[in-house]
Image (cartoon, rainbow, N blue to C red):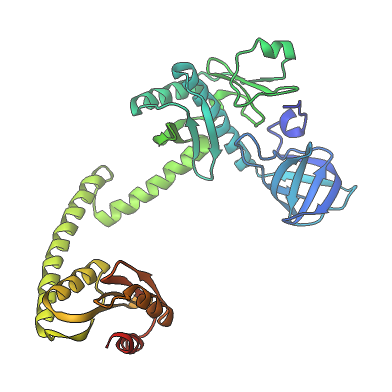
Amino acid sequence: MEELNELFYRDPYCQEFEAEVLSCTVGKKGFDVVLSDTAFYPEGGGQPSDLGNLGDAKVLFVKRQNGQVVHQTDKELKVGETVKGKIDWARRYDNMQNHSCEHIFSGLVNRKYGFNNVGFHMGDDVLTVDFDGYLTPEQLAEMEELTNAAFRKGQNIHIFFPSEEELKALDFRSKKELKGKVRIVEFPEADICACCGTHVKNTAEIGSFKILSSFKHRGGTRVEFAAGKRLINYINMLLRESASCVEQLSAKPQEISVALKQLYSEKNQLTEKLSKKSERIMNLISDSLPSEGKLLFVSEPELTPFEIKVFCNRLSEKKNFESILVLSEQAEKKLFNYILFSKEPNLAALSRELNKELNGRGGGKPPFVQGSFASSEEEIRKAVEAKLG
């Protein structure tokens, strides 16, 4: 890690700046622009790049390439001109809050349980961090409280470049062996880590931290969380969803789970009643059909795949036909689901032929094949009768 001195490091709170355009070349996505200085943070260390504008051009992505910060823009900029840059500050500050939060959380986990942060990702809504050991829900609840307590202390964050001798004597977290000047970010009483990202000045700026979910992952623990303004946005989203559920269920917010349990109970009772009615209807239809023959063609609309399977099995047991096709139109999808029973020895090959001829898909293990046809009922009947009738 080399000592870096761009504007986003010298003043991470800088929102607008002016710089000279050193180069502008056609890139894979628009134009690649290099400036004399920049407040735009390039993607790295798990932190997304900044977005914003350079003059009238939109900055779509920023990366570090061959020691330079390259801005991908949607418009060409003139080399030698002075351009005004403006970063998306709400996005940047949100990233600063959450990146700083991740350091404190990971550092406290490391100090308390000795687990290392082996993966970090900042998504659009939530962040994830992977630890190389398992943390129980109780342990995570403890770490959440300790992390929030660190915010409340309102301590300043210290960023520095130690000498080689100082670095050797320093106990810090790092995911890889580093060479050259190393940028160290220190959070008092919580973490000290090599990092290339941007951070808030004081821990109090982070606000609050909440673990949203956790689960076992590759022998360790993956934790999803949010902090600062991002956490507020997430909570607001949950409140909107809760309000919608409250309205639809006619229940109080604290009674949503009870109302859902009742709803599922009623659904299961209704499903059971429908299943019994469906069984009676199948029996009536079965009794009205011929008892034997070469091919039995049955078409009933809006049957579920499970009902089609049950119906075809029942017919194959009760009737003496060489082949039985049960077809059900799914009007919304503009196709027919089917199950074909046949004593035909080459049923698998025949199924492939039918699928090709009738814009179908599917297969199975003889004597049953199943799938769907995107053709009319008349076309399906003619094609099946031509091969099995």
For this rendering, which residue is in front, 14 or 33? 33
Residue 84, x across and y down, in percent: 79, 45
- Which residue lies at the image location 23% right of the left edge and 69% below the top edge? 309
- Which residue lies at the image location 46% right of the left edge and 35% below the top edge? 225
- Which residue lies at the image location 63% right of the left edge and 39% below the top edge? 92
Where is 142 relative to 364, above or below? Answer: above
Where is 90 relative to 323, above or below? Answer: above
The quarter of the displayed image where residue 56 is located: bottom right
Looking at the rendered image, the quarter that the C terminus falls into is bottom left
The quarter of the displayed image where residue 12 is located: top right
- Which residue lies at the image location 79% right of the left edge and 39% below the top edge? 66
Q: Is residue 53 left or right of residue 105?
A: right
Q: Can residue 266 be spotted in the picture?
A: yes
For this rendering, which residue is in front, 314 or 270? 314
For this rendering, which residue is in front, 340 or 203? 340
Where is 354 relative to 198, above or below? Answer: below
Residue 46, x across and y down, in percent: 60, 36
Looking at the rendered image, the quarter that the N terminus falls into is top right
